[in-house]
Image: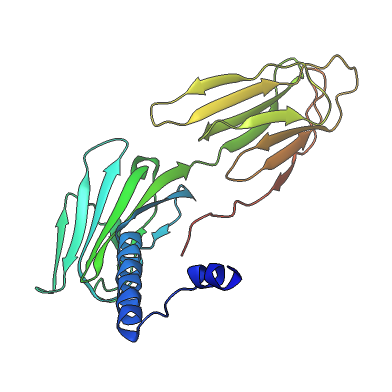
Amino acid sequence: MGSSHQAGWCKKPTSPTNARATLEVVRKTMNTIVLLIIAAITGATGTSTVGSSPVLTCSPKTNATMVTWKIMPKVGGHCALGYRADQNKIYRTNCSDRINWKFRPDRDPTLEIRQVEIAHEGDYTCELVKTEGNFHKTYHLTVLAPPRLTLYCDDHGVPVCQAAAGKPPAQISWVLESTSTPREEAHDNGTVTVLSKFTAHSANRTNTTCIVSHPAGNQSKSIACRPPGKLPSVCLEFKTPFSPLFMH
């Protein structure tokens, strides 16, 4: 009985022919998986500041038969920029000169937006055609507008802090606690001006500091307001620069 039970669990060795067939099936399956990965659509979020020149990559960079950038801005009409290797031809539809190839598209299809503006916000999709499959990548471009910081004393000797034309709206705070509620004014170009008055009940208003927090960089200014009829002291200004988040 022991020997019959052991024989029932033994398996016949796989023949070399069957082994090769199995390996071929595995190889084809792996190739299919790789092809699906290449043809998959990927996405990325890019952030840049007004006036900078963001760069959008579209990899893999070589052996493409056709490359097309499709731009869908939030405001205005769409545009397209493309290259066909078989004709060695570049074509452009409705794109401004600020949107262009950074290098020769037959070598590197990277896109560059020169002196970016808020109007350039939107979706930028790269479509890459290769012999082994298609590649799609979409960037969701967000453009930041750093606010202009102004700190002054009103007619009553009260410090007033203004962060003008920021996108998104800036946040204003004071080094000394204030009960002020900031006021916002939206503009047609998508920017917002924020204004805050220092309303703490204190007789000592010397060296009041306004802090403006914004994704494009933080700023601060100090001022010493005097009663009406007296000049304020000189303001001190500090800035923290913005670091772009774009892939190169």
- Asked whether the viewer can see residue 60, the reply is no
So how many labels did they put on this image? 0
Residue sticking out furthest to the front: 1
Residue 30 position within the rendered picture, expressed as x and y whole percent measured from the top left: 36, 69
Is 44 on the left or on the right of 210, as rendered?
Answer: left
Give the quadrant of residue 130: bottom left
| Image quarter (top left, top right, bottom left or bottom right) of the N terminus | bottom right
Q: Which residue is drawn at 31% across and 60% down?
A: 36
Is 89 on the left or on the right of 197, as rendered?
Answer: left
- Asked whether the viewer can see residue 12, the reply is yes
Q: Which residue is drawn at 42% across and 80% down?
A: 13
Of 179 and 158, nearer the camera is 179
Of 34 and 125, nearer the camera is 34
Tell me how the rendering is colored: rainbow
Residue 175 position within the rendered picture, expressed as x and y whole percent measured from the top left: 81, 31
Q: Which residue is drawn at 9% across and 73% down?
A: 87
Above or below — where is 31 with respect to 214? below
Above or below — where is 172 with respect to 95? above
Residue 225 position within the rendered picture, expressed as x and y whole percent measured from the top left: 80, 26
Q: Which residue is drawn at 49% across and 68% down?
A: 8
Is 220 on the left or on the right of 75, as rendered?
Answer: right
Residue 62 position within the rendered picture, expressed as x and y whole percent measured from the top left: 29, 75
Above or below — where is 23 with respect to 232? below
Of 246 and 205, nearer the camera is 246
Residue sticking out furthest to the bottom: 16
Give the quadrant of residue 209: top right
Above or below — where is 163 with respect to 201? below
Is 53 on the left or on the right of 154, as rendered?
Answer: left
